Amino acid sequence: MRKWRLVSPILLLCLAFVLIPAVSAQQTTYVVQRGENLFRIALNHGLTTQELAAANGIVDPTRIYAGQTLIIPAKGSPSSNPAPAPSAPAAPAPAATSTTHLVQPGEILSRIALRYGVSVQSIAQANGIYNPSLIYYGQTLTIPATSGSTAANPAPAPAPAPAAPAVTSYGARWIDVNLSTQTLTAYEDTTPVFSSLISSGTWQFPTVTGQFSIYLRYQSQDMNGYRLGYDYYLAGVPYVMYFYRDYALHGTYWHNNFGTPMSHGCVNLPTPAAQWLYNWSSYGTTVNVHY
């Protein structure tokens, strides 16, 4: 009995020295300093952010604070090496296909894009259109395939387009201004060759209707509305084509709200469209304005 009592304390002391390193090898602690984040602390200790968050029960890894004491798990411990979650087999990506669209009278690119669930920019890029407001009736557009869930569940096919109404020719080259749709279309006989959104006169200053001819042209002109009783002065209006008294087709740099009546009676065009029309038309070109 005496021999056992002498040996027992020694054995316990040896066991204590063995157990203490084993416990300390499991984990250490670290006090968060000002400006530190969990990612950097984990990196400095050879851990992942997920391992460090799991060891400390942190739900949101972005929310730690200066002075917080973190448990740093030892490498190889269960908390620092969580079992990877089984990954679900990836679903095969649906095949993406493009389609085409025939532009109808009065259509604009933004409404076509909305119809097919794609962006205006994607249609413009797919068709080499540098100005989205310049499309024309009869133009065939490539509609790029949508991605993700939209491609997996494509919109139902659009109904067949109605037959285009018969066009009355006003000469070899003539211009049609539709005040209802706020569009201008250039024709060669009965074939549309160019189209653009416009801004015609408001209800207070309506644009005249009828058949007219371009009788005066200026590549650039200052427009003084004060002499007509209007409160505006516009310097250097580009590509001006008068077709009736003071009513003209011309480029517009002071607004970009085409498709909406904005003017004092003139037909506002995007400047690139006005330039195209100015170069294409001539004195005597018919301008047909109607609703």
Image: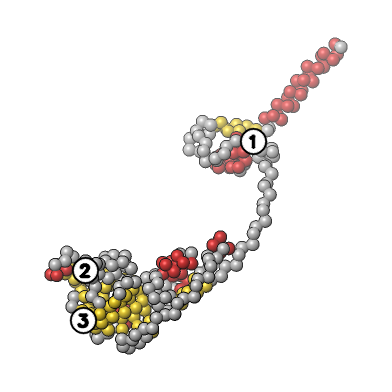
Gap in Å between the C-alphas at discs 1 and 2? Answer: 78 Å
* Res. 214 image quadrant: bottom left
Residue wearing tag 1: 73
Of tags 3 and 2, which is closer to the observer?
Answer: 2
In this picture, is 36 found above or below 245? above
Tell me which residue sits at (45%, 77%) in the image.
162
User: Mark 1 and 2 residues: CB-CB less than 8 Å, in contact?
Assistant: no
Query: Amino acid type of disc 2?
Result: Phe
Residue 135's spot in the image, x, y percent?
39, 74
- How packed mark 1 is, by other alpha carbons closer than 10 Å (few <14, some 14-19, many 20 or more), is many
In this picture, is 285 found above or below 98? below
Local SS, label 2 = loop
Tell me which colouring the rendered structure shows: secondary structure
Answer whether residue 78 is visible to the viewer in this image: yes
* Res. 188 image quadrant: bottom left
Local SS, label 3 = strand
Tell me which residue sits at (62%, 32%) in the image.
28
User: Mark 3 and 2 residues: CB-CB less than 8 Å, in contact?
Assistant: no
Residue wearing tag 2: 205
Residue wearing tag 3: 216
Q: Is 255 displayed left or right of 98 in the figure?
A: left
Query: Amino acid type of disc 1?
Result: Pro
* Res. 264 image quadrant: bottom left
Residue reaching furthest to the bottom: 172
Gap in Å between the C-alphas at discs 3 and 2? Answer: 21 Å
Residue 198's spot in the image, x, y percent?
31, 71
Q: Is 242 displayed left or right of 112 in the figure?
A: left
Residue 250's spot in the image, x, y percent?
26, 74
Query: Amino acid type of disc 3?
Result: Leu
Of tags 1 and 2, which is closer to the observer?
Answer: 2
Local SS, label 1 = strand
- How packed mark 2 is, by other alpha carbons closer than 10 Å (few <14, some 14-19, many 20 or more), is some
